[in-house]
Image (cartoon, grey):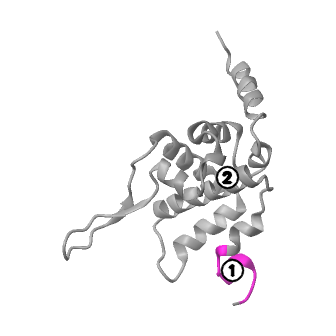
Amino acid sequence: MLKLSDLMVKVEAIINEIPGEKEMLLIPGLGLVTVAGFLSEVCELAQYAHPRQIQKLAGLTLKEYSSGKHKGQTTITKRGRRKLRSLLFKAIMPMVAKNNEFKALHKYYTTRANNPLKKKQSLIALCCKLIRVLYAIGTKGVAYNPQKLINDIKHPEVTGKVA
C-alpha cells in the first residue's frame, strides 16, 4: 500500500519532466498538487493555440441567457471539465489570501467604480487570469512576473501611480 509521501515523491518526479513546471511552482500560493492537477487535466499546453481554449475546456466561458426582449443573467457555461474548474477555484482561494498580486486584483475587481464584480465573479475572473499566467509560463518558459500581472489595473492605489 502506497503512503502519501511515496505518492508525492512519484508525482514530483513525473512533474519535473514537464517544461515550465519549476516556474509555475514559484508562484506564491500554488503548490505541487495544484500544478500537477492542472497539467493532468489540460495535458500538453503546446496543443492549445490560445488560453481561451483552456478556459472553454474548464467551462469558464461566459454565456447570457436571454430571449427576445428579455436580457437574462450572464453566467459561466459549466460545459467542460468539472475537475479542472473545481481545481482552479480551490487554488484561487488561497492565492487571493497569500499572493499579493492576486489579492490586489481581487480588491480592484470588487471595488472598481465602473462595473464592480461580486466576490465570486471576481474569483472566476481570477481563475481565468491564472489560466493565462500558467499558459504563458508553460508555453514560453518565462518566469512569473508579478508586475505584469497587475499592469491591467489602472487604479492608483494598487499600482502606486497617479493617474
Q: Is residue 9 above or below residue 111?
A: above
Residue indicated by mark 2:
134
At x 67%, y 41%, the residue is: 35
At x 60%, y 47%, the residue is: 91
Residue 12 colored magenta? Answer: no
- Farthest residue to the top: give it: 1
Which amino acid, by three-letter code, is at mark 2? Leu
Which amino acid, by three-letter code, is at mark 1? Glu
Estimate the x, y position of residue 51 in percent, counting from the top left: 59, 57
Toward the viewer: 134 or 126?
134
Q: Is residue 156 above or below residue 103?
A: below
Estimate the x, y position of residue 65 in percent, counting from the top left: 28, 64
Residue at disc 1, secondary structure? helix
- Farthest residue to the bottom: give it: 163
Q: Quadrant of residue 13?
A: top right
- Farthest residue to the left: give it: 68
Magenta stretch, residue numbers: 152-162
Residue at disc 2, secondary structure? helix
Toward the viewer: 42 or 1?
42
Q: Quadrant of residue 38?
A: top right
Residue indicated by mark 1:
157
